[in-house]
């Protein structure tokens, strides 16, 4: 899997989580800020294995909602 496809996967899961966050009990603004911080903390990650691991973690969170 190449880096551009990883980028697209990250953007897709971010948008999916953002969409699901609209119904978050503490409010969508609370969820959006926390989601942005979580992704921003990993923004400079360049190791593809760690990026894939982060995508798997985000998919797990997505399935749990």
Image: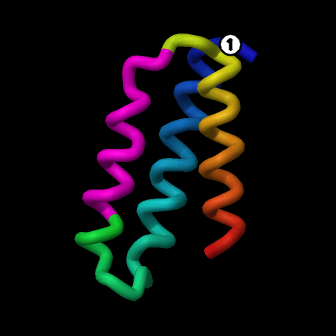
Horizontal side, residue 27 vs residue 43: left or right:
left
Q: Residue furthest right?
A: 1
What color scheme is it? rainbow
Image-based side of 29 in relation to 49, left or right? left
For the N terminus, the quadrant is top right
> Residue drawn 27% across and 70% down?
30
Query: Would you identify the image quadrant in which residue 65 lies?
Result: bottom right
Residue 17 vertical placement versus 14 (above, below): below
x and y percent of residue 61 in the render?
62, 61
Q: Is residue 23 depicted above or below 64 in this figure? A: below
Q: Please report the residue visible at 43 percent of the width from the left and 83 percent of the height from the top.
A: 23
Residue 42 appears at what percent x and percent y? 43, 30
Query: Which picture quadrant has residue 25?
Result: bottom left
In the image, which residues are magenta? 32-45
Instruction: In this rendered view, identify the residue nearer to me: 53 or 21.
Output: 53
- Residue under label 1: 2
Q: How many neighbours does mark 1 have within 10 angstroms: few (below 14), some (14-19), or many (20 or more)?
A: few
Q: Residue 41 in magenta?
A: yes
* In the image: residue 17, left or right of residue 29: right
Q: Main secondary structure of the magenta part?
A: helix
Pick the residue in front: 25 or 1: 25
Q: Is residue 30 magenta?
A: no
In this figure, what is the number of numbered marks?
Answer: 1
Question: For the residue labelled by badge 1, is the local secondary structure a helix, a strand or a loop?
Answer: loop
Residue in the picture at 24% in, 71% down: 29
Question: 18 above or below 28?
Answer: above
- Residue 26 is situated, as x and y percent measured from the top left of the image, at 32, 83
Relative image position of residue 58 (x, y in whole percent): 60, 50
Q: Residue at x 33, y 36 (%)?
A: 40
């Amino acid at each position: 899997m190449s880096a551009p496809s990883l980028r697209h996967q990250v953007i897709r899961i971010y948008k999916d989580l953002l969409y699901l966050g609209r119904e978050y009990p503490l409010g969508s603004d609370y969820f959006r800020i926390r989601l942005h911080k979580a992704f921003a903390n990993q923004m400079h990650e360049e190791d593809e294995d760690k990026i894939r691991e982060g995508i798997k973690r985000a998919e797990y969170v997505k399935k749990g909602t």
